[in-house]
Amino acid sequence: MKRSTFRLAALTSTVAIAGVTLAACGDSSGGGDGMLAAIEAGDVTIGTKYDQPGLGLRNPDGSMSGLDVDVAEYVVNQIAEAKGWDAPNVTWRETPSAQRETLIQNGEVDLIAATYSINKGRSESVNFGGPYLVTHQALLVREDEADITDLESLDGKILCSVTGSTPAQKVKDALPGVQLQEYDTYSSCVEALRQGNIDAMTTDATILLGYSAQAPGQFKVIEMEKDGEPFTNEYYGVGLAKDDAEATDAINEALTKLHESGEFDKLLEKNLGGNEAVAPGKPGDLSFLD
């Protein structure tokens, strides 16, 4: 089994988003009338993570930064431009993994871009635009960790991920001897790892790269493979209300332009430094669900 650690060239986590309103966690405002209606009305509520450096992060000054944040803003602004509407005001809503489908179904958010992997189970509850990127599942361990070098070496170890996400369960299915510990947020897993209460945490490489870069010298990211291939492929999409075909098409058109214009590569470089753990997705192509 090959072992490799991902290197992150640069990570920007302090980019201020002008004209953005941050919603309090208890705010229940959102797009009960649908995403396109919200954009046309000029006020859109976007769900994302608040604790994932380089992807979705609420900064100390209250601004938002990260690749998911930038992609979501691009999408709503591009849709508004294509429709001849003014760019909408954005309210950000924190969307923990276990709450994403519920928040969409309740109309508390208009769309979600929050390291939201597209899978069959979720697609039964919500629609997805995208995917806009493809990444792989990996491990975060302490820098001085010598025993964990690959997937098989996790057997018998304490592994952490977040409630409502799928990566840890996939490892548990492959290695029944793994002791699974779940927390509400990835940042809680990182702190448990720092304190030595768990042996490793697992999720998408994009997320782990951000945490590793945020604490230089403390952690390292280890690739996981099975039979010489990545252990998983994770396809990030934009979640929205189930069966809203018009809005889904609009998102896919915006994401296609994002890629074809080269803007996605710029956003990737700005937020995650550009790295081997991320590849562009093919918006509208959900054949991987078959």
Image: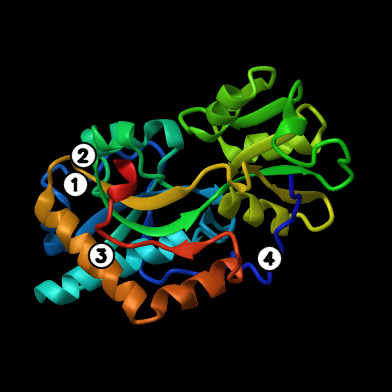
Q: Quadrant of residue 171?
A: top right
Which residue is painted at 38% across and 64% down in the image? 71
Secondary structure, mark 3, is helix
Q: Mark 4: few, some, or many residues within 10 Å (few <14, many ≥20)?
A: some
Residue 239 x %, y %: 29, 47
Residue 191 x %, y %: 72, 37
Quadrant where the image shows the N terminus: top right
User: What residue sits right under mark 3 in the picture?
Assistant: 76
The nearer-to-camera label among 4 and 3 is 4
Quadrant where the image shows the C terminus: top left
Q: How many marks?
A: 4
User: What residue sits right under mark 2 in the picture?
Assistant: 107
Which residue is painted at 21% across and 39% down in the image? 107
Secondary structure, mark 1, is loop
- First along the sequence among labels 1 and 2: 1
Label 1 close to label 2 by CB (< 8 Å): yes
Secondary structure, mark 2, is loop
Label 1 close to label 3 by CB (< 8 Å): no
User: What residue sits right under mark 1 in the picture?
Assistant: 31
Q: Measure the C-alpha gap from mark 3 to mark 2.
A: 17 Å
Q: Is residue 258 visible?
A: yes
User: What residue sits right under mark 4 in the picture?
Assistant: 8
Q: Which amino acid lies under the numbered mark 4 shown in the image of this protein? A: Leu
Q: Measure the C-alpha gap from mark 4 to mark 1.
A: 36 Å
- First along the sequence among labels 1 and 3: 1
Which residue is painted at 36% across and 44% down in the image? 118
Which is more toward the observer, 195 or 158?
158
Q: Measure the C-alpha gap from mark 1 to mark 3.
A: 13 Å
Residue 27 x %, y %: 33, 40
Q: Mark 2: few, some, or many residues within 10 Å (few <14, many ≥20)?
A: many
